[in-house]
Amino acid sequence: MALSPLEISTFYQLLDRGGSVLDFTRGALDDFVGATIGETPCETYQLPMMKSLRACVKDLDDERLFKLFSALFEYYEQHYKSEYAASPAGYRDISYRRERADQVELCKKALTREHSGLNPFAQSSECLKGQFSSEYMSQQIDALNTLRNENPTDAIGKAKELVESCCKTILKELGVIVQTSWGMSELVKATMKVLNIATESVSDNLPEAETVRKILGSLSGLVGGIAEFRNHWGSGHGKAADFEPLFRRHANLAVGSSITITEYLWNTYLWRKETGKLAS
């Protein structure tokens, strides 16, 4: 699941203070967001404070968006309780306070729902910044195998995220700058190149060269297929009211493909690291 446009809009209503974000200065907001998800919206986007935050939010995946809004909502609750709390007499004395209370309740319910929905994948977003590990991969694969039966739509979205997490970690560990514009295909292509397993890296001297190239080329096709699966039927995008999710067999296909790609890339990375064959 993901926060709906209405829910995101409600968060903005709580945070927006005439173009500012609560009582933050630009520097303080960058420090807060940086400590939470590693982004600096004001410095990065060079827009007015609230517009910078909105621009940053548009570039976040569901997990990092959830983490950011959770932190901002917690800050709001700690510093702005007078805006929405009941009066000593037991009622909210002005319409403004009632409106704020309704907004707080909607945000709280949305975060509670998302927290519950993200439990199978409730690892810190730090996994996308270098903490991906063999243990983490095993946990996510186990979770995917469960989720593809319980919620095929979410499974398709998480299958793509697993591959992306793996690629981003390998690229960061090897000093490759990941461009924000890169999609899944670009991430996998760059990862295969740095691991020296791209089709053009296969030596013609190998007797099985052509076969290896075919297999590696098929992996590239799988990557494109998973990305299209997620874009059309996964949990990463809003859906129309008449949206019909795919059957479990389609989730099984996406999950199985993502596991195959992730295990291959990660095991290749570990093998090259252990044998000293990583590119310097």
Image: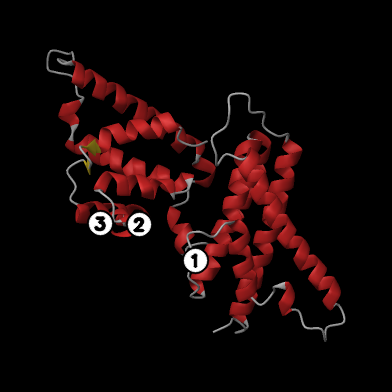
Secondary element type, mark 2 = loop
Q: Residue 21: which quarter of the image? A: top left
Q: Are marks 1 and 3 in contact (CB under 8 Å)?
A: no
Q: Label 3 neighbourhood size at 10 Å, few (<14), some (14-19), many (20+)?
A: some
> In the displayed structure, would residue 49 be above or below residue 183?
above
In the rendered structure, which disc, 2 or 1, sits on the residue that comes first in sequence? 2
Looking at numbered disc 1 in the image, what kind of residue is underneath it? Val
At x 73% / y 76%, what residue is drawn?
200
Drawn side of residue 227 relative to residue 66, left or right: right
Drawn side of residue 98 relative to residue 145, left or right: left
**Across the whole image, how many numbered discs are drawn on residues?**
3
Tell which of 235 and 166 is nearer to you.
235
Secondary element type, mark 3 = helix
Disc 3 designates what residue?
A: 31
Disc 1 designates what residue?
A: 178
Drawn side of residue 134 relative to residue 219, left or right: left
Tell which of 151 and 180 is nearer to you.
180
Q: Are marks 2 and 3 in contact (CB under 8 Å)?
A: no
Instruction: Measure how far apart labels 2 and 1 are at the Cα level.
Output: 14 Å
Instruction: Measure how far apart labels 2 and 3 are at the Cα level.
Output: 9 Å
Secondary element type, mark 1 = loop
